[in-house]
Image (cartoon, grey):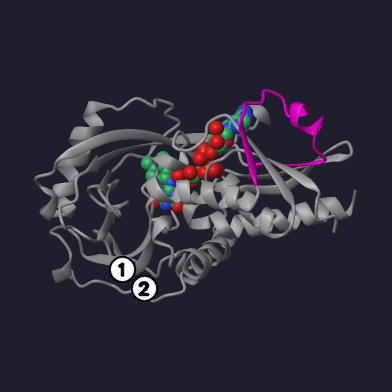
Amino acid sequence: MDDKKEILVLGSGVSGLSTGILLLKKGYSVMIWAKDLPPNTTSNKAAAVWYPYLCYPREKAIPWARTTFEYIQKEIMDNPKSGCIIRTVTEMFDKQQPEPWWKDGFPGKVERPTNEELPEGYVDGYRIKSIVIDTSLYMDYLMETFKSLGGQVIQKEIKDIKEALQEYDVVVNCTGLGSRELFNDDKIYPVRGQMIKIKPTGFDEVVVDDEGPNNLCLAVPRVNDIMLGGTAQVNDWNTEVDSKDTEEILRKIKLIAPELKDVEIVSESVGLRPAREAIRLEAEKFDDKTVIHNYGHGGAGFTLGWGCAQDTVELVDKALSSL
Ligand SMILES: Cc1cc2nc3c(=O)[nH]c(=O)nc-3n(C[C@H](O)[C@H](O)[C@H](O)COP(=O)(O)OP(=O)(O)OC[C@H]3O[C@@H](n4cnc5c(N)ncnc54)[C@H](O)[C@@H]3O)c2cc1C
């Protein structure tokens, strides 16, 4: 392999930075062009938790999720600057559930809380020891790691992929929702998520209701704060905070975590999850140039990030070997 070959990555959210880091570790030179840099990406708006949610196809998401969990455990977890911490995560249901679809993507044990351990109205749940990936720290950690390995970043929006292909033989596309315009992909759409950041209260477990009477509702205690959510509004492009959503989040959170009835709001935010019927991770030829796509991670960009990045690097290797 020509180890000085320069690869262009479009996008500096979790997908672009994770892929950039693995490309650098493989010996490539890497340049990122991104319209928005952290802290102004969608990725910064997530809480986030390792928990496969709103991501397809499931048979691919399972190994990507497992690779990501194991990579964070082995390579990242020990560094406090990463913002990764282990927490108990409970998803609760008002009906009995089969085993979770993502069970084989999780290297630990999935426990089932008893009725008595759940709030009123809930009868079943999945309880795991998972990773909270505090994006307020993790995105900076990724950027610092990328730069310390020699990666370069330029803030730059492109309107036409030809702008990138004029300068690079292989371009990795991690533009998330930006791919809708850049690649005329109407399969990608926003799923709006509003979140409230509150001061820490001592509450230290992640709780989620995604399908039950209070869906969607979650609390994610991070390193220095707690994130409360949320919403999952399909095809809603509104990035402004909606006070009705705020009221609903605060009303519902008391029902799944009564400890959070009195909270002090620090700030509110909205992010648009880049959802797609299937994550697009594949090569596309443009004459003798190649674009490797890695986008459409929906509600699971952090959960699948390292697994998708590994497969993207393999496609880059393949594209270069055929040049
Ligand atoms: C409220 C909320 C909660 C979430 N919670 C979780 C969670 O708990 N766990 C989890 O795993 N995931 C979670 N997610 C999902 C996760 O945030 C996304 O899947 C992930 O951030 C997608 O990352 P990305 O790098 O693909 O895209 P983005 O973060 O959107 O990055 C895209 C990058 O491409 C750039 N770009 C776009 N168009 C262009 C262009 N034309 N030219 C140049 N650059 C361009 C952008 O500026 C940006 O830098 C959540 C999301 C939200 C909104």
Q: Residue at x 18, y 38 (%)?
A: 265
Element type at mark 2: loop
Residue position for label 2? 110
Residue 270 image offset from top left, x and y in percent? 36, 33
**Is residue 210 toward the left or the right of residue 164 in the image?**
left
- For label 1, the SS is strand
Residue 233 at x, y percent in the picture: 38, 35
- Outermost residue on the left side: it is 262
Between 252 and 174, the one lying in front of the other is 174
Q: Residue flagged by tag 1: what amino acid is it?
A: Arg
Q: How many marks?
A: 2
The answer to whether any part of residue 197 appears in the image is yes
* C-alpha separation, residue under disc 1 versus residue under disc 2: 6 Å
- Magenta span includes 246: no
Residue type of the residue flagged with mark 2: Val
Q: Is residue 299 visible?
A: no
Q: Report crowding for label 1: few under 14, some 14 to 19, many 20 or more residues within 10 A (C-alpha).
A: some
Q: Are marks 1 and 2 in contact (CB under 8 Å)?
A: yes
Mark 2 near ligand 1 (CB under 8 Å)? no
Q: Nearer the viewer, residue 209 or 300?
A: 300
Give the residue at x 36% y 48%: 47
Is residue 155 rendered to the left or right of residue 194? right
Residue numbers of the magenta segment: 151-173
Numbered mark located on residue 127 in the image = 1
Residue 124, placed above or below residue 182: below
Say which of 174 and 177 sits in front: 174
Q: Residues within 10 Å of mark 2 (few under 14, many from 20)?
A: some
In the rendered image, residue 21, in percent from the top left (x then y), is placed at 62, 53
Tell me which residue sits at (51%, 69%) in the image.
Answer: 70
Residue at 39 percent of width and 40 percent of height: 45
Q: Position of residue 273 (x, y in %)?
A: 46, 39
Find residue 160 and report its image quarter: top right
